[in-house]
Image (cartoon, rainbow, N blue to C red):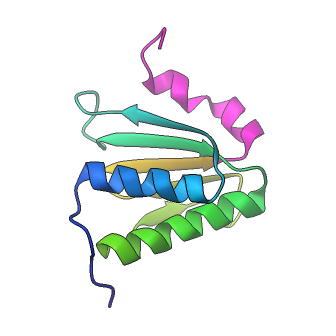
Amino acid sequence: MAHPTQELTSENLLDQILNSLTDDKAEEVVKIDLRGKTEVADYMVIASGRSTRQVSAMSEKLADRLKQRFGLVVRSEGKETGDWVLIDTGDVIVHIFRPEVRDFYQLEKMWQPQGS
């Protein structure tokens, strides 16, 4: 059983997610503060991987790191196809896309205020 090594707050979780994605060479990482906009989560992170293999690998490593760091078991969807993986950690929702899939859905536009 993994023993958490760090307190589980949405900010610590966000930092660990951003560090994991950076370590795995994620591209165009965007952090969106959802506090006060929705009850679903405190933050959303959107990132791109260059290939289905990289998208799947980044999501697996992220899940492993969160389990080791916080003892957190996350839910994920889409890892089998690798076009778009959704990772729900509770306080932070992570989307990892292949670039053309990300362009198609344009999630950032839905959540970010215009002009930012």
Residue 37 position (above or below residue 20): above
- Image location (x, y in percent) of residue 99: 73, 40
Write the residue at 44% across / 22% down: 112
- Give the residues drawn in magenta, as a range: 97-116
Q: Main secondary structure of the magenta part?
A: helix
- Image location (x, y in percent) of residue 74: 40, 67
Residue 73 position (above or below residue 95): below
**Residue 44 on the magenta segment:** no
Task: Give the residue at the far bottom of this rendering.
Answer: 1
Is residue 56 visible from the viewing direction of this image?
A: yes
Write the residue at 30% across / 44% down: 41
**Count of labels shown?**
0
Q: Is residue 45 left or right of residue 84?
A: left
Task: Give the residue at the far top of this rendering.
Answer: 115
Q: Is residue 81 left or right of residue 112?
A: right
Dividing the image into 4 quarters, which one contains the N terminus? bottom left
- Image location (x, y in percent) of residue 58: 61, 62
- Say which quarter of the image contains residue 9: bottom left
Write the residue at 57% across / 62% down: 59
In the depicted view, which residue is nearer to us: 107 or 27? 27
- Image location (x, y in percent) of residue 22: 57, 52
In the depicted view, which residue is nearer to us: 91 or 76? 91
Is residue 79 visible from the viewing direction of this image?
A: no
- Say which quarter of the image contains residue 60: bottom right
- Say which quarter of the image contains residue 44: top left
Residue 59 position (above or below residue 10): below
Write the residue at 77% across / 49% down: 50
Q: Is residue 72 left or right of residue 113?
A: left
**Residue 103 on the magenta segment:** yes
